[in-house]
Amino acid sequence: MSELNDLAIPEIKLIQNVGGDDAKQMGAKAGDFYCSITQEIIPGSEGFDVVVLRPAQKTRTYWGREDIDDEPPVCASEDGVTSINGDICAEACPYGAFTDAPYMVSAAERRAKCLPNYNIVVIKVSDMMPVMIRCSGISSMAARELNTLLKFHKMIKNAPHKATIKVTSIKKKTASGEAYAIKFGDPKLVTDEDLLYEIADQASALLGETIEVQALPEPPAPAALPEPKNEEPKEQPKLSF
């Protein structure tokens, strides 16, 4: 049975210039990552290493207002395809607010749209804690690129636990000014066998399925040095005076 269903997965949020007051009171700056449960601040330029537990899962949210408060959104979708009202989002949005490319419109337009969100559950390698990374707005393309990486990259295809991925933030210029987006780096193969087994054990417990680990190949033996040749000393020429 998956432990993910029984946990309040901590969310690591990317702090922007606007909002994130709680994080900023703790010392976070725009472009930093912040986890409210642990109150950890991670500089965006340094980032953190993760192992992806499962591909980004698409959802949708239409708030129907500029101010996001404690009230629920006007409409939403748990699978990114069908709304909670039973409508096919791309074909029959009753609010005329559907968009699948929020990174192509301004921030003002995004607030009036039904936006895709991508939820990614990962293991943060530094403390082996499962965390949620939510990609929306200008970060949504990064989530789609990550899914492509997980599906086709030969190093981690069908085995994402074999490699770590660095999560950082990058500054982007938008029509509404500067904002920060999430960036996923290239996979880096885990070469520490103890760490590899620890990741596999944690992933197995969280997902409720056995993650098989293949032992790392032995490093190649150093090439043997050539044996020195026993050469006869050359006779020194005789000098005549």
Image (cartoon, helix red, strand yellow):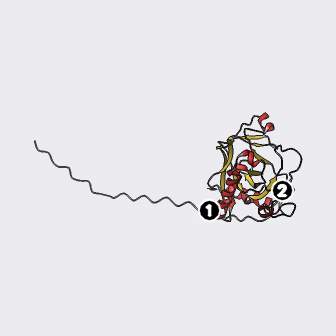
Q: Where does label 2 land, which residue?
A: 76
Q: Quadrant of the N terminus?
A: bottom right
The residue tagged with tag 1: helix, strand or loop? loop
Q: Residue at x 88, y 50 (%)?
A: 72
Can see residue 129? no
In the picture, measured across the screen, residue 169 lies left or right of residue 78, that is left
Query: Can you name the residue that lies furthest to the right here?
Result: 71
Q: From the top left corner, tell me how far across and down residue 54 is, in percent.
A: 74, 60
Q: Where does label 1 land, which residue?
A: 153
* Amino acid type assigned to the residue bearing label 2 in the image: Ala
Q: From the top left corner, tell me how far across and down residue 146 is, in percent.
A: 67, 57
Is 11 rendered above or below residue 208? above
Task: State the CA–CA distance, disc 1 to disc 2.
Answer: 32 Å
Mark 1, residues whose alpha carbon is within 10 Å: few (<14), some, or many (≥20)?
some
Q: Residue at x 62, y 62 (%)?
A: 153
Labels 1, 2: front one: 2
Can see residue 141? yes
* Amino acid type assigned to the residue bearing label 1 in the image: His
Query: In this orientation, which residue lies closer to the viewer: 168 or 2?
Result: 168
In the picture, measured across the screen, residue 141 lies left or right of residue 218, that is right
Q: Earlier in the sequence, mark 1 or mark 2?
A: 2
Is 240 rendered above or below residue 82? above
Q: Quadrant of the C terminus?
A: top left
Is 214 rendered above or below residue 96? below
